Amino acid sequence: MSLLPHSCWALFARCLERDERSLDLRIWRDFLRTREPAKRETFTFAPGFKQLGGGGITRTDLEPLAVSFDSATPDEQQQTIWVFSRIILGASLSTDSFIFAVSWLLQKASPSLSELAKYWIIDSATNLAEDDRFDAAELTLSVQPVSAESKGSWNRLEAFLVSLLQKDVSRFVSFSLRLAERSAREWLAIMQQPRNLEWLISEMQGKELGEMVGSLVLSDRVACRKLGFFLFDALSLTSLPDALLAPVSEKKTANCAP
């Protein structure tokens, strides 16, 4: 695959500054309409293209790409995921186009996607959450589990979690428990590696997270329990809430009764 020289993309960027909206629309539509994989690949890796906002793109522009997804090749499907993941970040995208693109992503996002496609979805979901534009929790959870080897995805997931924690602890707890149900093993594996998710751990320090950690420790799932014990130590907790321990004590007492 041959890419245009970097000087051409520098000229492209200057043109973008002069006529951002019309050029934005023209480039996106050229991308959406081409059926040539090599040309799409060139667009994807072009400097500046990832920052295009999708202004002027309509649902009519997106529908043919969405409809052809199931019959497309794996590479074309991956590129389509990229398009929809980037298009929803456009501040000038119409509400109708945004709703259509997000709804489509929610339908197609699944654990079976490639790790690269998962990264694009998590990255876009994190950007939306950080800007308070959309509650992207379901979109983020839909692609779990994410491999512990996909550090880029976990870095963006860390940013998602920190953003959620800083805004609403109860929502963070609810999301984290659901994430653990899907990715406890991978979440633990990435945190056990040096210098990974340290930002998240530091933000969790001092927060009222005993109930969340206790729920993990007392989970029926081995992976969740291991994650819970790791967090118990990492957050320097000394005990779990009595409300969580009481039912366990009652169950043990009942089992010991003659």
Image: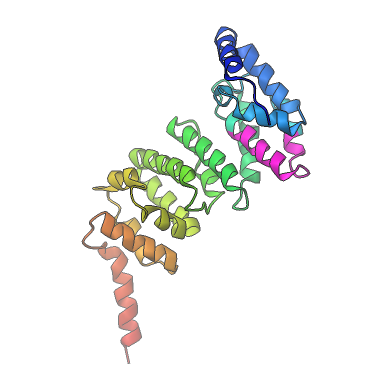
Query: Which percent across, then down, holds residue 21?
Result: 61, 13
Does the segment drawn in magenta span residue 67? yes
Left or right of 257? Residue 20 is right
Q: Residue at x 67, y 36 (%)?
A: 80
| Quarter occupied by the C terminus | bottom left
- Please name whichever residue, 178 or 109, is drawn nearer the observer in this view of the structure: 109
Left or right of 159? Residue 96 is right
Task: Tell which residue pokes out farthest to the left in this image.
Answer: 238
| Quarter occupied by the N terminus | top right
Q: Which residues are the magenta region?
A: 65-85
Left or right of 206? Residue 60 is right
Image label count: 0
Query: Which percent across, then down, holds residue 82?
Result: 62, 35
Does the segment drawn in magenta span residue 100? no
Q: Is residue 221 above or below residue 84?
A: below
- Please name whichever residue, 212 or 49, is drawn nearer the observer in this view of the structure: 49
Q: Residue at x 27, y 50 (%)?
A: 208
- For the stretch drawn in magenta, the main secondary structure is helix
Query: Which percent across, then down, holds residue 160?
Result: 43, 40
> Which of the 4 image quarters holds residue 16?
top right
Q: Is residue 166 visible?
A: yes
Q: Residue at x 41, y 43 (%)?
A: 158
Q: Is residue 215 visible?
A: no
Query: Which percent across, then down, holds residue 120?
Result: 56, 38
Q: Is residue 228 above or below residue 168?
A: below
> Which of the 4 image quarters holds residue 230?
bottom left
Task: Tell which residue pokes out farthest to the bottom in this image.
Answer: 258
Q: Is residue 26 above or below residue 198?
A: above
